[in-house]
Amino acid sequence: LSPYTAVRLFQNLSFEPGEGSTFSLDVGETWSDFPEARRQLTTYHFIGRSRLRLTSHLSINAEGGVRVQQGEGYDQTLKTARADLDFHYGKLVVQAGYEFQDENYLGELRERHFFFLRAKRSF
């Protein structure tokens, strides 16, 4: 809707401490310039993920992230976290978990909590 230029920088760190277990961290920065609006916006995001394999059929997943946007007259912080238990057996996948979302936009705070149960069978 408005012309802009942006410079982005991304970093990623990931490793596998054991078979089926992974840990990763994604970090990014974006500097945006909107010349017509005479506005600059800076965005930072951090996302951490982990997967821990308990048995050949059962694993625990956790991930969380923060995104911060700052600029003149514009401040927004978004946070989210999710944890779930995955069960895989043949073509059946069952997930049970919890998700949290937190949004702070110009001082207005919104929180959301979700519990979920998913079952999927592939044919």
Image (cartoon, rainbow, N blue to C red):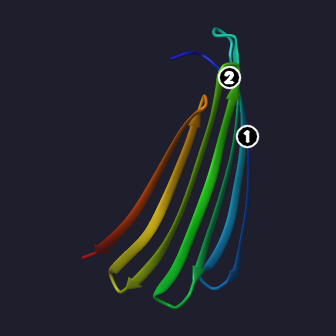
User: In the current view of this chain or complex, which residue is farthest to the bottom?
Assistant: 55
Quadrant of the image for the C terminus?
A: bottom left
> Which of pointers 2 and 1 lies earlier in the amino acid sequence?
2
Q: Amino acid at mark 2?
A: Thr
Residue at x 68% of width, y 65% of height: 24
Judged by depth in the image, the label closer to the viewer, 2 or 1, is 1
Residue at x 54% of width, y 72% of height: 61
**Residue 47 % position (x, y):** 65, 55
Above or below — where is 79 with respect to 81?
above
State the CA–CA distance, disc 2 to disc 1: 14 Å
Left or right: 116 in relation to 39:
left
Counting other residues with Cα less than 10 Å from the Cα at mark 2, is it few (<14), some (14-19), or many (20 or more)?
A: few
Q: Quadrant of residue 35?
A: top right
Q: Amino acid at mark 1?
A: Glu
Residue with the mark numbered 2: 5
**What secondary structure is marked by label 1?**
strand
**Residue 60 % position (x, y):** 54, 77
Residue at x 56% of width, y 88% of height: 54
**Residue 7 % position (x, y):** 73, 31
**Residue 85 % position (x, y):** 47, 77
Q: Mark on residue 37?
A: none
Above or below — where is 70 with respect to 120?
above
**What secondary structure is marked by label 2?**
strand
Residue with the mark numbered 1: 29
